[in-house]
Image: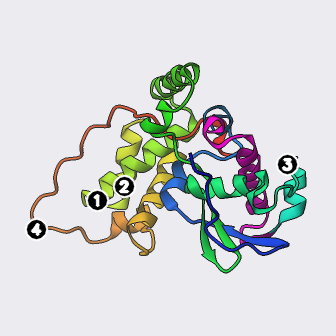
Amino acid sequence: MSRPKLAIDLPTDALRIVRWEDPVLDAIGHDPRSSYVERFWLSLLGPSTTFLIRRIAAALEVEPGGFDLHLEDTAKAIGLGLRGGMSGPFYRALARTGQFHITKASGAGELAARTRLQTLTRHQVDRLPLSLQAEHAEWVASTEAVPDAEQRRTRARRLALSLLELGETDEATELQLHRWKIHPSTAHEALRWARGQRSDEPLASASAVATGPRATTGAPRPPIPPPLRPRPVYGPADDAA
């Protein structure tokens, strides 16, 4: 297998790191410091790249507007140094972040980095050792059977978005989520998220919807679908780091 190549010409001292905004993955992905990434992504990325993206995620949490990644200091901090130059282990670890679409070039001497990673695809799972493949299958089954708080939030968001796309009002959407036994605070957060995904229009309050004029013309809206069977959701309990 050929070695991954860097997508940019690197400066000699520091590299500017900014957030790679991805609303969907930011909402449902795995924090690089989570147990999911340590258990399953580690086998694909290798320890050096895994340590590197953890440091980047931690720094972006403190400085969300971006920060300067000092190359020599970072290389030493993860036990590599800059031995071997551009073909050495540190730069190979940095290049692998691009190979797996965790970073991308966003300007001269600048990389945009994700702060959440996706759940492994089937092709990626097939590359894991057999023992980890079995463990990943158990993880998927367990998240389906007993959803944790993050998974419940993700399901609520998906349902809210589906209801809005069917033409339901904000109030009707939130009430329907309550009927599906979704906690009121989770339902309200899901509604705000779904509204933000659809447009930049301000969120209508429940009282405004209740007192405002109701449409009386046009074709009737399709019926509200029953709640879907929970699906595997992309994030174990500690992903909200």
The answer to whether residue 101 is above or below residue 155 is: below
Front-lying residue, 90 or 125: 90
| Residue 125 visible in rendering | yes
Label 3 sits on what residue type? Ile
How far across and how far down the image is residue 232, in percent?
Answer: 44, 34
Residue at which label 1 appears: 165
Give the mark, 2 or 3, whose residue is nearer the N terminus.
3
**Are the residues flagged by discs 4 and 2 in contact, CB closer than 8 Å?**
no
Give the alpha-carbon distance from disc 1 to disc 2, as whole Å: 6 Å
> For the point 23% across and 67% down, which residue is it?
214
Residue type, label 2:
Leu
Inter-mark Cα distance, 1 to 3: 47 Å
Position above or below: 106 against 236: below
> Looking at the rendered structure, which numbered label has been put on residue 78?
3
To which quarter of the image does residue 179 belong? top left
Q: Where is residue 222 in the image (x, y as percent from the top left)?
A: 16, 52
What numbered label is drawn on residue 205? none
| 106 or 65: nearer the viewer | 106
Q: Nearer the viewer, residue 26 or 176?
A: 26
Name the residue: 74% across, 40% down. 47
